[in-house]
Image: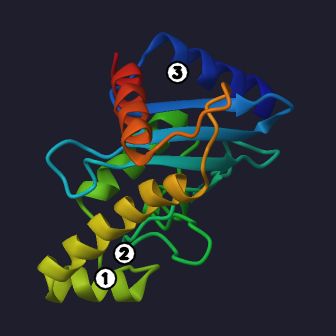
Amino acid sequence: MAVRRLQQDFRQIINNKVDGIDASPSSDNIYIWNAIICGPEDSIYESGTFQLQLLFPDDYPHRPPQVRFITKIFHPNIWSDDGLVCVDILKDGWLPSYDILAILHSIRLLLIDPNPLSPANLEAALLYRNNRVEYDRRVTQMIQETLDIDDDDDDDDGNGQIEDGDTLRQKSTILRHSITE
């Protein structure tokens, strides 16, 4: 049943593009999915492009997937050590009618509207509640560090040329636009 439902969810993603969200199963295991969420416009996360991994149980959709950010992120509801997402629809609020788009949409909305009263990252939750300027600075710093890591890795573009940070930022912008088209 899970395989059939995952195939159905994939068809829905292909046929119903959603701005700032894309996902697909890994090539060798339909229970492992890779996703990209673009930071919501007019939010502190707007300049970020975030990679996620979804691990589906054998009895999906009766149980929710485990979702983690692969991209480092500073957020009250995302564990800082492993990137696991702490949101109600992946726990007690799970319903089998939720599909992958609903999950990713919910996580994208969580970036705009965190729940500091149910934190996975206590430091981020306290800053969000008590010092929004510092919280915003830390979010921006984490996004910038993610872009800078790409600079430090000296990523090769396949032609033997090293890409600089500006090139990677351009590619991120192109990726954001291709996801939203």
* Residue count near mark 1 (Cα–Cα under 10 Å), binned few <14, some 14–19, many ≥20: many
Q: Residue 181: where, in percent of width, then height?
A: 34, 15
Q: Residue 140: where, in percent of width, then height?
A: 27, 65
Residue 29: which quarter of the image?
Answer: top right
Q: Residue 118: where, in percent of width, then height?
A: 38, 79
Amino acid beneath label 1: Ala
Q: Residue furthest front?
A: 161
* Residue count near mark 3 (Cα–Cα under 10 Å), binned few <14, some 14–19, many ≥20: some
* Residue at (35, 49) in percent of width and height: 48
Above or below residue 174? Residue 92 is below
Mark 3 element type: helix
Residue 158 falls left or right of residue 130: right
Q: Which residue is mark 2?
A: 76
Q: Nearer the viewer, residue 64 or 133?
A: 133
Mark 1 element type: helix
Q: Which residue is mark 1?
A: 125
* Residue at (18, 83) in percent of width and height: 129
Nearest to N terminus: mark 3 or mark 1: 3
* Residue at (41, 18) in percent of width and height: 17
Q: Which residue is mark 3?
A: 13
